[in-house]
Amino acid sequence: MTGKIDGDRLWRRVMELAELTERERPYTRRSFTDLFLEGRVWLGEQFAGAGLELSIDSGGNLVGRRAGSRDELPPLVIGSHSDTVSGGGRFDGIAGVLAGLEVAQTLGDYGVTLRHPLEVVDFLAEEPSEYGLSCVGSRTWSGHISTEDLKRVGPDGETLGEAIQRVGGVPSLLGPEPLRKPGSLACYLELHIEQARVLESKGLSVGIVTEIVGITRHRVTFVGRTDHAGSTPMGLRHDALVGAARFVDGVSGKATAFADGEDYFVATVGQIAVAPNAFNVVPGEVSLVVEHRSNAKELSKRFSGELERLTNEIATALELTCAFETVSTANPAICDAFVRDTIRNASEDSGNGYLVMACGAGHDAMHMADIAPMGMILVPSRDGRSHCPEEWTGPDDLAAGVDVLYETVLSLDATLD
Ligand SMILES: [Zn+2]
């Protein structure tokens, strides 16, 4: 490794923050908890030690700022999140925040002053929080949070707004107005673990993201007739679960065909409810949620159409009634072409093998794409594991990714306004 960043320092920090976990359930540091706030205190010390000016913004995000020589320019921003899922890993999000810190500190080590100010951000509550909302902090920046969202109540009766206030935010300033106006950031960069095994399988250290996939969710319901499982002959049944089973198999088959082309495509039936769900009763009603993700909007639209057709065909064949409804659609977040090319040049210069790829998981970067030119760097996940204690990215891979991030920041600082 010939890069400029200090891989040992970075690694030490990743391992140190990992120590702040619920003891019986490593690695857990849920947003808004005391442990999370302990993590924030530790992060603040690290930020300050690296010469960053600290603040908590109205969205409850921890921001470390390094002044630029032309400090009036919009900031270059590097962000991710320090909260975890329950029983998660040591790298998801954390790697990205500490990568930003490492970039800032390396600039200091080499006596480099950027033209732009640099901000390193720990976005609040990226993982689905106790309030049923994910990416809370990055939503406040992009205005993707509503006053209704702030009234969501958590398990202790505290509202999301109150929780944001407790961690230092100002909920009265939040709502549909973005905290950061579109165009007020020079760019947004995020390094994240891949959470899949593509990079590892190809022996590459760096993934350059083209798009973060869009997600579409449908609720499908089959209604047949609840009957006695012993006395109802096979030919007289209207079994809703048989319909659902055909549907699940159809989703898998169709998605496999859709994934055959250039574009990213996955689909999953991950939730199913059977009524009455008793072993001696023919299922009368089944409702399931199917989600599909793709970088290509057209593909998603076509898939939705095929699913609706499939639902109707199955219902007709089995004499069931059915309902097909779209629960949510989120468009893919496109990475900025110039930022992407800059990351690619930095990867080539560093000699690290890289892959240009779509990203199948959601990140804070998705919300930033609406207000800033956005770019993402992925680093490999061993065996693709994530959101589990086995989550792992080797120190060399992590350092390689952060080196590319460092060089990307230098180039963007020189070229962006
Ligand atoms: Zn994450």
Image (cartoon, grey):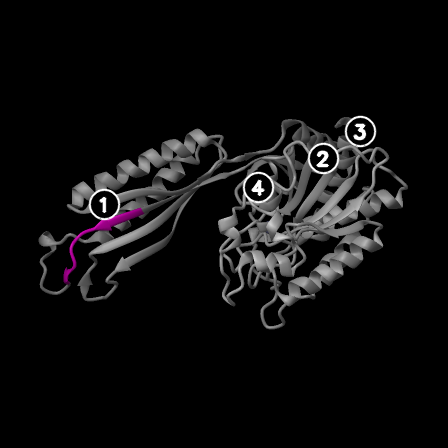
> Gap between marks 1 and 3, in whole Å?
58 Å
How many residues crowd mark 3 within 10 Å: few (<14), some (14–19), many (20+)?
Answer: few
Image coords of residue 247 (percent x, y): 29, 45
Of labels 1 and 2, the one closer to you = 1
Label 1 sits on residue:
322
Label 4 sits on residue:
143
Q: Which mark is residue 414?
A: 3
> Gap between marks 4 and 1, in whole Å?
37 Å
Q: Secondary structure at mark 1?
A: strand
Magenta highlight range? 220-228
* Camera-nearest residue between 313 and 58: 58
Q: Is residue 297 left or right of residue 118?
A: left
Q: Amino acid at mark 1?
A: Cys
First-in-chain label (1 vs 2): 1
Residue at the spot 68% in from the left edge and 48% down from the top edge: 96
First-in-chain label (4 vs 2): 4
> Gap between marks 2 and 3, in whole Å?
17 Å
Of labels 4 and 1, the one closer to you = 4
The answer to whether the residue labelled 4 contacts the one labelled 1, judged by CB atoms less than 8 Å apart, is no
Q: Amino acid at mark 3?
A: Ala
Of labels 4 and 2, the one closer to you = 4
Indicate yes or no whether the magenta region holds residue 326.
Answer: no
Q: Secondary structure at mark 3?
A: helix
Q: Quadrant of residue 198?
A: top right
Q: Residue furthest front?
A: 172
Taken as a whole, is the magenta stretch helix, strand or loop?
A: strand
> Gap between marks 4 and 3, in whole Å?
29 Å
Label 2 sits on residue:
347
